[in-house]
Amino acid sequence: MLFVCYPRCTTRIKAKKWLLANDLKFEERHIAENKPTIEELKKWHKASGLPLRKFFNTSGKLYKELNLKDKLKTMSDEEQYELLASDGLLVKRPILITADKVLVGFKEEEYQSLR
């Protein structure tokens, strides 16, 4: 499993604690230092089954500064992928990538399905 996160994020702390408590092995990747590529984002988006807008960190400073709440409505998927790939802090996290699923954010009930 790949655990893509931002170390100072409180949600990451909860998710990592859950993974460790459940003896699940994972590789951790710092999303700001090693941001996702467009190809990775496309693959993760498809595997997640979520709308692309769910990959945006709507609580982030940059999201608000760029007024993305309104701009995303008129952007193509390609433009959104490019934007997400430009700055890891625009991406909602943590993202957990397993062999058969991609979980965005941390919801304990979703993580339960990993056991």
Image (cartoon, rainbow, N blue to C red):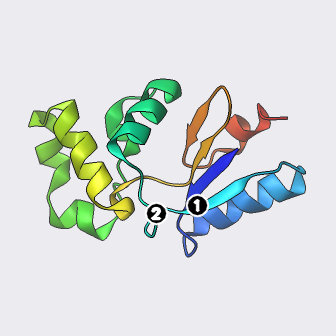
11, above or below 101, in the image: below
Residue 40 picture quarter: top left
Q: State the residue at coordinates (11%, 46%).
A: 71
Residue toward you, 106 or 36: 36
The quarter of the picture where the C terminus appears is: top right
Q: State the residue at coordinates (79%, 55%).
A: 18
Q: State the residue at coordinates (72%, 40%).
A: 111
The spot of residue 62 in percent (x, y) is 25, 66
Task: Pick whichever of labels 2 and 1 is earlier in the sequence.
Answer: 1
Q: Alpha carbon of mark 2 to alpha carbon of mark 1: how far?
A: 7 Å
Residue 100 picture quarter: top right
Q: Which residue corresponds to mark 2? A: 34
Left or right, residue 13 beside residue 40: right
Left or right, residue 37 beside residue 67: right
The spot of residue 64 in percent (x, y) is 22, 63
Q: Amino acid at mark 2?
A: Asn
Q: Amino acid at mark 1?
A: Arg
Residue toward you, 15 or 88: 88
Total labels: the figure holds 2
Q: Secondary structure at mark 2?
A: loop
The quarter of the picture where the N terminus appears is: top right
Question: Residue 43 shows which numbered tag?
Answer: none
Q: Are marks 2 and 1 in contact (CB under 8 Å)?
A: yes
Q: Which residue corresponds to mark 1? A: 29
Q: State the residue at coordinates (78%, 35%).
A: 114
Left or right, residue 94 beside residue 72: right
42, above or below 38, in the image: above
The spot of residue 39 in percent (x, y) is 37, 37
